[in-house]
Image (cartoon, rainbow, N blue to C red):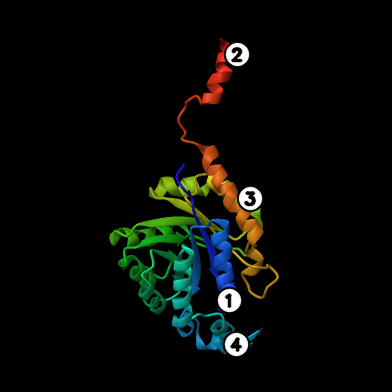
């Protein structure tokens, strides 16, 4: 089996703190991940004024706006993240939640793009992403096959390479709802690589996804699941991430080539038992 691309989703689990973001990058590097991913929003484009004016208690204030803006990194922070990831030797990219954010990310010349599940039906954003021609991970949580068909058509029209991510957008996801058999089904239907983006507690589902042919694994990571934030409980801590990466690399070896052949050790046994 080929190398499974492992993405450590930092998302907004940095809580607007660049030092926490760097610690999470270090966690991903130490575990052996291939990339870290963030989320980028233009708050006034993604949310309505009525929503932003609504009440919400957070470390940044008492409104939804204060909370959303407190979680957003701007150009100075992302410039430092870009340099830090280059120094650490790990790729980074981000899922944009609006066209302005996608355009903002271009200044960093990232290798990959990501369509978040919530954005799969945003045609304007999909057109903008596909126009860049970068390898794009497309999360399929909350989506019907018809909606996936429509999104895929946009990327195929632009001749932009993509990989679907099987996903259940429940935070955290009950393991009984994983439906991992959809991974080979999506691969057969669309003829593309299919990965898995998980929001469940623990790491077993993600490891099983690899056994079913997932070409990438994306998991939210956190320093501590009890930290402030809506995504923390559905994230995995450093020790879990390390164990998951190690197990995935072992599974890659166990899956083998799929061709029937006798190993050297089996040939020795054959000679003993069959003469």
Task: Give the secondary structure at mark 3.
Answer: helix
Q: Secondary structure at mark 2?
A: helix
Question: Considering only vertical position in the picture, is 185 above or below 54?
Answer: above
Question: Do the residues bearing badges 1 and 3 touch, measured as CB atoms within 8 Å?
Answer: no
**Residue 208 percent location from the top left of the image:** 58, 46
Q: Foreground mark, 4 or 3? A: 3
* Image marks 4 and 3: residues in contact by CB distance under 8 Å: no
Left or right, residue 80 beside residue 250: left
The numbered disc on residue 37 is none
For the residue carrying disc 2, how many other residues have a C-alpha within 10 Å: few (<14), some (14-19), or many (20+)? few
Q: Quadrant of residue 58?
A: bottom right
- Mark carried by residue 273: 2
In the rendered structure, find residue 54 and report the number of the disc placed on it. 4
Residue 169 in view, yes or no: no
Q: CA distance from mark 3 to mark 2?
A: 37 Å
The numbered mark at residue 204 is: 3
Q: CA distance from mark 1 to mark 2?
A: 61 Å
| Other-residue count near label 4 (Cα within 10 Å), few / some / many at <14 / 14–19 / ≥20 | few
Residues packed near mark 1 inside 10 Å, few (<14), some (14 to 19) or many (20 plus): few
Q: Position of residue 174 (x, y in %)?
A: 65, 57
3D distance between C-alphas at marks 2 and 4: 75 Å
Would residue 226 appear left or right of 241 to someone viewing this image? right
The residue that disc 1 covers is 19
Q: Residue 229: image x %, image y %?
A: 64, 74
Query: How far from the left and from the top, in percent, is residue 11?
Result: 54, 70
Instruction: Choose top left, top right, bottom left or bottom right for residue 100.
Output: bottom left
Disc 1 versus disc 3: nearer the observer? 1
């Amino acid at each position: 089996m080929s190398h499974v691309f492992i993405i450590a989703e930092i998302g907004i689990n940095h809580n607007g703190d660049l030092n926490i973001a760097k610690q999470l990058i270090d966690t991903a590097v130490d575990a052996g991940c291939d990339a870290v991913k963030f989320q980028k929003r233009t708050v006034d484009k993604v949310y309505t004024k009525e929503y932003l004016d609504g009440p919400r208690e957070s470390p940044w204030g008492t409104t939804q706006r204060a909370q959303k803006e407190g979680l957003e990194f701007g150009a100075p922070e992302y410039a430092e993240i870009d340099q830090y990831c280059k120094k650490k030797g790990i790729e980074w990219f981000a899922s944009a939640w609006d066209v302005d954010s996608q355009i903002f990310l271009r200044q960093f010349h990232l290798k990959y793009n990501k369509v978040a599940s919530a954005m799969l039906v945003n045609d304007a954003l999909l057109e903008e992403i596909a126009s860049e021609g970068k390898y794009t991970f497309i999360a399929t949580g909350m989506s019907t096959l018809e909606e996936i068909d429509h999104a895929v058509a946009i990327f195929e029209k632009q001749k932009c390479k993509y990989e679907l991510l099987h996903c259940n957008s429940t935070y955290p996801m009950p393991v009984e709802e994983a439906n991992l058999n959809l991974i080979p089904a999506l691969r057969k239907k669309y003829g593309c690589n299919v990965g898995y983006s998980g929001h469940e507690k623990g790491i077993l589902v993600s490891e099983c996804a690899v056994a079913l042919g997932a070409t990438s694994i994306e998991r939210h990571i956190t320093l501590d699941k009890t930290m402030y934030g809506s995504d923390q409980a559905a994230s995995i801590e450093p020790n879990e991430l390390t164990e998951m990466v190690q197990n995935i690399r072992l599974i890659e070896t166990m899956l083998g080539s799929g061709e029937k052949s006798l190993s050297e050790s089996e040939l020795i046994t054959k000679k003993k038992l069959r003469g």
